[in-house]
């Protein structure tokens, strides 16, 4: 983490947007051990996106994984299915694992989604949190950094130019080929999804890309120096402040009472992070740790609507103005009914509070 630096002025244009990210997990219910069929889980996910649109949420993202417990290896297809049943909600990846993908195909898939959705597609390009895609697609893990940098460069050039001339280390050159279709949006949004490395924040600023920060633990205010680095890097590169948007991907859940929210969310949260911990050498997740993260300055946004809104206000102020906050709820293996209820509360109770307080 970089040393404390001078904090830049808050940058926020219009009210903060609220959305949801889903990983389309196919894991057992932590209480009943029931597992939906893959087809039913995806139908449920489409219903969740439709409801998010109906209650006025701003965005819905679908992740990308290549593991047995997830169904989202092809997020653009899931989002396209949702596009045909929604009207206004933005549809984004969360994230596109660009290191293991062909930028030409990524652009074509999301340009198609943009046309199907009448201009609502967005790409959040990132490295992902798992490494299974590298051997799956015949890539070398030691090329982790150079793969991402080169493919991001190509993706941005494809967005800006057509036909395209390009050459690099990891892909055959392009020598004047046209890449089609072109999206409806003249400049389809490409966000840079980042974790916690200063280099990633500075890169996003230099490129003038909107930033999507994954905060899944600790205290959000600790990311302020990195976000300031992003804004300062962007300003030095000549980008207008309004283009340097900051979004957050955070774990959260809304229920009618705080006790219900905590009791609903904890079992699946603990199950997921304990399992990940076994792979990465972390100790099992405890209720005490969970409750600490639900506290006023912790990274979990779990509670009743007013409490959730207050936590969002705190995070918005601590990080100098946030353009979008996407809730990740599927990590807790919640039932479909509970997810629908949380989506409705987020759209009808929390979002109006946030929009009224953050609009300028």
Image: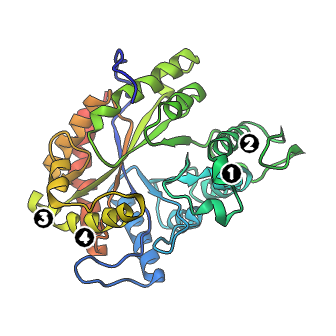
Residue 270 visible, this angle: yes
Residue bearing mark 1: 107
Q: Secondary structure at mark 1?
A: helix
Quarter containing the C terminus: top left
In percent of width and height, residue 347 lies at 28, 54
In percent of width and height, residue 136 lies at 65, 66
189 sits to left or right of 165 = left
Discs 2, 4 touching: Cβ within 8 Å? no
Residue name at image x 72 percent, y 36 percent: 160
Residue 303 visible, this angle: no
Q: Quadrant of residue 236?
A: top right
* Distance of label 3 from label 1 (alpha carbons): 42 Å
Residue bearing mark 4: 338
In percent of width and height, residue 38 lies at 47, 81
Q: Secondary structure at mark 3?
A: helix
Residue bearing mark 2: 158
Residue bearing mark 3: 260
Q: Secondary structure at mark 2?
A: helix
Discs 3, 2 touching: Cβ within 8 Å? no
């Amino acid at each position: 983490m970089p040393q404390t630096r001078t904090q830049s002025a808050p940058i926020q244009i219009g009210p903060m947007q609220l959305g949801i990210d889903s990983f389309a997990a196919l894991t057992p219910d932590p209480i009943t051990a029931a597992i939906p069929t893959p087809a039913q889980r995806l139908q449920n996910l489409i219903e969740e996106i439709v409801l998010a649109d109906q209650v006025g949420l701003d965005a819905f993202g679908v992740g990308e994984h290549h593991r047995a417990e997830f169904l989202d290896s092809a997020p653009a297809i899931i989002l396209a299915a949702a596009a045909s049943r929604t009207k206004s909600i933005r549809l984004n990846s969360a994230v596109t694992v660009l290191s293991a993908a062909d930028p030409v195909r990524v652009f074509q898939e999301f340009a198609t989604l943009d046309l199907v959705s009448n201009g609502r597609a967005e790409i959040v390009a990132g490295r992902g949190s798992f490494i299974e895609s590298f051997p799956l697609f015949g890539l070398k893990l030691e090329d982790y950094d150079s793969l991402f940098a080169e493919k991001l460069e190509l993706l941005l050039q494809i967005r800006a130019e057509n036909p395209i001339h390009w050459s690099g280390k990891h892909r055959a050159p392009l020598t004047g080929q046209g890449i089609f279709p072109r999206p409806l949006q003249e400049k389809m949004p490409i966000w840079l999804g980042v974790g916690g490395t200063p280099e990633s924040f500075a890169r996003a600023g230099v490129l003038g890309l909107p930033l999507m920060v994954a905060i899944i633990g600790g205290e959000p205010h600790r990311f302020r120096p990195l976000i300031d680095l992003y804004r300062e890097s962007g300003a030095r590169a000549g980008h207008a402040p309004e283009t340097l948007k900051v979004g957050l991907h955070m774990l959260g859940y809304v229920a009618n009472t705080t006790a219900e929210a905590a009791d609903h969310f904890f079992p699946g949260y603990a199950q997921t992070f304990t399992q990940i911990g076994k792979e990465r050498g972390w100790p099992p997740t405890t209720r005490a740790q969970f409750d600490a993260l639900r506290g006023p300055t912790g990274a979990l946004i779990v509670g009743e609507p007013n409490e959730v809104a207050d936590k969002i206000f705190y995070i918005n102020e601590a990080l100098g103005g946030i353009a979008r906050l996407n809730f990740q709820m599927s990590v807790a293996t919640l039932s479909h009914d509970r997810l629908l209820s949380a989506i409705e509360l987020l759209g009808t109770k929390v979002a109006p509070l946030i929009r009224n307080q953050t609009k300028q």
